[in-house]
Image (spheres, rainbow, N blue to C red):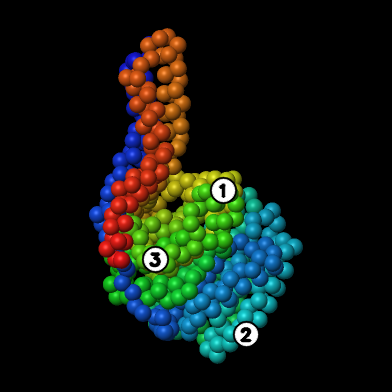
């Protein structure tokens, strides 16, 4: 009854993406078994960070209460104790929560708590040359698209404005190597912060790198030294393209391996099932990554270290305002992100299903917002647009475009797998009603493929355990 050309076309379209997931998973699995994990070369800074590699560790996040400010400043203190060194500084970058009002009643409370915490910590850990701890809190600006007051460009804007403050201060104190672009200097000239403990500092050091963390990310013992050591190695130094709009060699951004915090992994039944084993595995060093091991590029997920001046120069006119919320993949592509797979930072995990799906929704929305970077040409933004043509050639390489496309593909797989199961079930049922159902019906094959695509990670884990369990035992007994 339903063995028509149209049925075949519909089922073929629906099953195409689930099939791609199956062979992509198989190829990735084979590559991880035959390609050794490659380590990023590093300099040894365990005895201290040199002046030339001075670094700021920052937490850019929304703060709306004194309690949250104090919690985050306490985290920064812990990070400092775990990575104590000269030329390593810490800052809480407080973003204002969006509102219908330019000023909220809790703003003054937040500013006061931040300033008091910074004063207390700097008195506790005194540094004669430059204070170790800092606090910045942003102004709200009216956004006509969002129809509310909020910080310009959210997290991306917060980091951009912080970068501009540092570059402007370094330019003022006569740093000859500063590369503050004249075309983007308006960002630095405008005061975007209600509170800024850097504003009155005259002897600001030349900051080379920024380590950016999420509010639920933990900077583990000595990990800052290792990240700075990796960025400072001569083999990793970034080289820009002729137009200076993308990194073509080396790395201007590095992403550590992200694990799940032990406490977060035990918060609820949901996290116990899905978060896996939390904490740090003392017996594992580096892990394999398809992109890093085969192409010397990784994927940036928002936590890592970047070169301050290169970041500011490359990205100054690349991302239009009010268009991209999830910018991590783009930044990683422009700055040629590397995955430092033997350094691990511990992150939180959503404790409930709704929070988990909300996070996935934000990620997928961000993936679709950057679809324009698959095109050959992209729009030019910034203060110098009238001088330059309205569009330019997309500087992203083929691999970066593939990463974007692959994220879009994976975002559609659950939808297409569900529709494949639904449609094939309907066809099976209808064929059964008219008495023509058989195991040779293509609908059964479509149904099976869709189920396999959904459960492919689990199937690979089981096969991996069965195949390599004997090898592990043999190696264990040889060691004995």
Residue 440 position in % (x across, y down)? 32, 19
For mark 2, give the secondary structure: helix
In the image, which is nearer the foreground, mark 1 or mark 3?
A: 3
Residue with the mark numbered 1: 270
Q: Nearer the viewer, residue 64 or 388?
A: 64
Query: Quadrant location of the N terminus?
Result: top left
Image height of 370 relative to 17, above or below: below
Residue 283's mark?
3
Residue 21 in the image, given as x and y percentages of width and height: 35, 40
Q: Quadrant of residue 191?
A: bottom right
Residue 124 - label: 2
Marks 3 and 2, how far apart at CA? 36 Å
The secondary structure type at the circle numbered 1 is helix
In the rendered image, the residue lying farthest to the left is 34
**Which callout, 3 or 2, points at the residue further toward the start of the chain?**
2
How far is mark 2 from mark 1, CA to CA? 41 Å
Label 2, residues with CA under 10 Å away: few <14, some 14-19, many ≥20: few
Name the residue located 72 percent from the left edge and 61 percent from the top edge: 104
Is residue 110 placed above or below 446 in the rendered structure? below
Lower position in the chain sequence, tag 2 or tag 1: 2
- x and y percent of residue 387 in the render? 39, 60
């Amino acid at each position: 009854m339903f063995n028509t050309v149209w049925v075949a076309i519909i089922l073929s379209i629906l099953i195409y993406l689930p099939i791609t997931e199956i062979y992509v998973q198989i190829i990735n699995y084979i590559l991880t078994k035959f390609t050794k994990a490659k380590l990023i070369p590093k300099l040894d800074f365990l005895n201290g960070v040199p002046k030339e590699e001075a670094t700021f560790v920052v937490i850019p996040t929304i703060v709306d209460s004194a309690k949250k400010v104090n919690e985050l400043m306490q985290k920064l203190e812990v990070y400092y104790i775990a990575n104590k060194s000269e030329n390593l500084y810490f800052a809480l970058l407080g973003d204002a929560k969006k509102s219908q009002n330019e000023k909220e009643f809790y703003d003054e409370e937040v500013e006061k708590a931040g300033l008091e915490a910074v004063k207390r910590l700097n008195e506790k850990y005194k540094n004669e040359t430059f204070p170790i701890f800092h606090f910045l809190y942003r102004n709200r600006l009216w956004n006509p698209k969002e129809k509310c007051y909020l910080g310009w460009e959210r997290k991306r804007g917060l980091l951009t404005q912080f970068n501009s403050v540092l570059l402007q201060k370094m330019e003022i104190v006569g740093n000859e190597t500063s590369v503050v672009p004249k075309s983007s200097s308006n960002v630095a000239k405008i005061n975007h912060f209600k509170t800024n403990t850097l504003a009155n500092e005259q002897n600001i050091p030349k900051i080379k790198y920024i380590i950016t963390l999420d509010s639920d990310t933990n900077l583990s013992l000595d990990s800052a030294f290792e990240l700075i050591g990796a960025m400072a190695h001569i083999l990793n130094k970034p080289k820009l393209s002729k137009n200076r709009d993308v990194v073509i060699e080396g790395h201007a951004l590095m992403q550590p391996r992200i694990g799940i915090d032990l406490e977060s992994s035990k918060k609820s039944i949901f996290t116990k099932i899905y978060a896996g084993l939390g904490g740090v595995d003392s017996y594992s060093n580096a892990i394999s990554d398809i992109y890093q091991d085969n192409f010397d590029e990784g994927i940036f997920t928002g936590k890592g270290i970047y070169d301050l001046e290169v970041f500011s120069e490359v990205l100054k006119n690349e991302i239009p305002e009010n268009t991209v919320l999830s910018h991590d993949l783009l930044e990683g592509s422009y700055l040629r992100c590397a995955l430092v797979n033997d350094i691990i930072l511990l992150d939180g995990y959503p404790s409930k299903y709704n929070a988990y799906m909300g996070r996935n929704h934000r990620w997928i929305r961000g993936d679709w917002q950057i679809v324009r970077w698959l095109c050959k040409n992209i729009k030019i933004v910034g203060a110098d647009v009238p001088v330059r043509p309205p569009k330019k050639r997309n500087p992203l390489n083929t691999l970066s475009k593939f990463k974007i496309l692959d994220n879009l593909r994976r975002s559609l797989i659950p939808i297409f797998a569900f529709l494949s199961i639904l449609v094939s079930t309907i066809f099976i049922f209808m064929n059964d009603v008219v008495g023509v159902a058989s195991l040779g019906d293509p609908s059964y094959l479509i149904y099976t493929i869709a189920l396999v695509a959904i459960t492919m990670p689990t199937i690979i884990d089981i096969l991996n355990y069965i195949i390599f369990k004997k090898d592990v035992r043999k190696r264990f007994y040889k060691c004995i």
